[in-house]
Amino acid sequence: MQRVCVVALLASALGMSEAIAQPMSISSRSHLDVASAPSAAIPVQYRQQGDLGGGFIEFLFSGGGARSAPRSRVYANVNPADYASRPAMDPRYLKQVVDYDGTEKRGTIIIDTPRRFLFLVEENGKATRYGIGVGRPGFTWAGVKHISQKREWPDWRPPDEMLRRRPDLPAFMAGGPNNPLGARAMYLGSSLYRIHGSNEPWTIGQAVSSGCIRMRNEDVIELYQRVTVGTKVVVI
């Protein structure tokens, strides 16, 4: 009986929603074509969750503090049909092939933090562009790194600095669909930063992380297959 009540409460509370925040406007730059994707409706693949700053981990371990309540995560014991559909993400952040006339060599990754795009430089003046989520204010950074490790379904261990800020977080979370690092992770040099997947695709195009670069799982799997350890990563 207690389990039924909990599920009912979840279905009632999580059915409430608010409008998804609009991503920042995109301005053009000379070396990267930033034409927006068509605004056609995108098939629903996920459900929206509250904007809790730190993402899924914030949701799990917020402890009922001042952060806003979760809005519509799909739980294993709740029928997804009970929830209103939400778009996977703003369509402008879907993968595209765009023009590139910069100086970086083929295979280089360029991360444009202000516009929330990741570019993989191709041949013949082209680049593949992916939408990303970036660091919250105070957690953004810039520089040149190289991919030092690659991991499939990586485990997650919050760094000491994060645990000091959030002592309620777990010291370890095994890799899997509910892990905040998603399906793949590419580690950047000796830093704590990664390019990784996400189980929250609606956050792509937003400033939500603690400095890592997050992608849709399907996008990060593709990128993971196309780059190697040693790949140059330019963060601007």
Image (cartoon, rainbow, N blue to C red):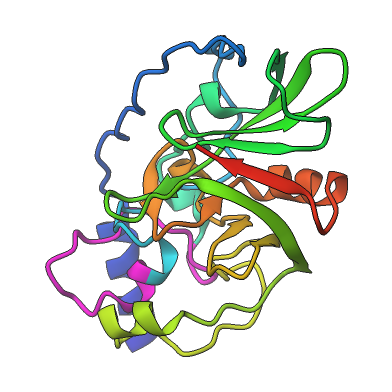
Does residue 93 show up magenta in the picture? Answer: no
Q: Position of residue 3 (x, y in %)?
A: 38, 84
**Which of these two is toward me, 186 or 95?**
186
The residue that appears at 37% across and 44% down in the rendered structure is 207
Residue 33: quadrant of the picture: top right
What kind of secondary structure does the magenta stretch mostly adopt? loop
Does residue 77 show up magenta in the picture? Answer: yes
Q: Position of residue 124 (x, y in %)?
A: 87, 13
Residue 132: quadrant of the picture: top right
**Which of these two is toward me, 61 or 115?**
115
- Can see residue 48? no
**Split into 4 quadrants, where in the image is the N terminus?**
bottom left
Farthest residue to the left: give it. Answer: 66
The residue that appears at 53% across and 51% down in the rendered structure is 213
The residue that appears at 32% across and 27% down in the rendered structure is 22
Q: Position of residue 191 (x, y in %)?
A: 55, 68
| 109 vs 51: above or below | above
Q: Is residue 135 left or right of residue 127?
A: left
**Which of these two is toward me, 108 or 223?**
108
- Can see residue 59? yes
Total numbered circles: 0
Q: Position of residue 6 (x, y in %)?
A: 32, 77
The residue that appears at 80% across and 30% down in the rendered structure is 105
| Magenta region | 58-78
Q: Is residue 110 left or right of residue 165?
A: right
**Which of these two is toward me, 172 or 3?**
172
